[in-house]
Image (tube, rainbow, N blue to C red):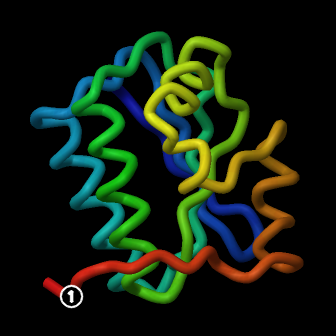
Amino acid sequence: MNYSVDERYDAVVITLKGNIMGGPDGQQLHDQLRELVDEGKTHVVVDLSKTKFMNSSGLGMLISGLTTMRNAGGDLRLARVADRIQSLLVITKLITVFKEFDTVDEAVESFDTEPPSEMETEEP
């Protein structure tokens, strides 16, 4: 997995590329998200348009990122979810947990119009 980070207005867009399977890549992404929180950047959009495959560890990585952002008072939202990944989110019922948008711009703009989702999280 590779990823790129781009700041747009009041949000950070992370574009995940390739196969999302957790492991060392998951730790790298987690570290990136913690760094963003430390910088006060808690509005994150994950662009999944270039994601080819995702397994359960990859889903866990997204959930961990979501929890990190919500614990910091922000949110992690998904954009441009490929059909294969969409099916995985529906089957696992995670579609009810994440806010999802057709475009990155819609997801970025949503931070101005929609409050962060409420989710019970545990303090570390």
Spot occupied by residue 47 in the image (x, y as percentages of width and height): 61, 38
Query: In the structure shown, which secondary structural element does the residue marked by tag 1 occupy?
Result: loop
Measured along the vertical axis of the image, is residue 47 above or below residue 49? below
Measured along the vertical axis of the image, is residue 77 above or below residue 47? below
The residue depicted at 61 percent of the width and 25 percent of the height is: 86
Neighbour tally class for label 1: few under 14, some 14-19, many 20 plus, Cα within 10 Å = few
Q: Is residue 6 left or right of residue 104?
A: left
- The answer to which image quadrant residue 39 occupies is bottom left
- The answer to which image quadrant residue 80 occupies is top right
The residue depicted at 55 percent of the width and 71 percent of the height is: 75
Spot occupied by residue 102 in the image (x, y as percentages of width and height): 83, 37
- Residue on which disc 1 sits: 123
| Pick the front one: 93 or 49 | 93
**Number of numbered markers:** 1
| Pick the front one: 50 or 92 | 92
Q: Amino acid at mark 1?
A: Glu
Looking at the figure, which quarter contains the N terminus?
Answer: top left
Measured along the vertical axis of the image, is residue 71 above or below residue 19? below
Spot occupied by residue 122 in the image (x, y as percentages of width and height): 23, 82
| Pick the front one: 92 or 63 | 92
The residue depicted at 51 percent of the width and 40 percent of the height is: 93
Q: Is residue 107 left or right of residue 65?
A: right
Looking at the figure, which quarter contains the C terminus?
Answer: bottom left
Spot occupied by residue 57 in the image (x, y as percentages of width and height): 22, 32
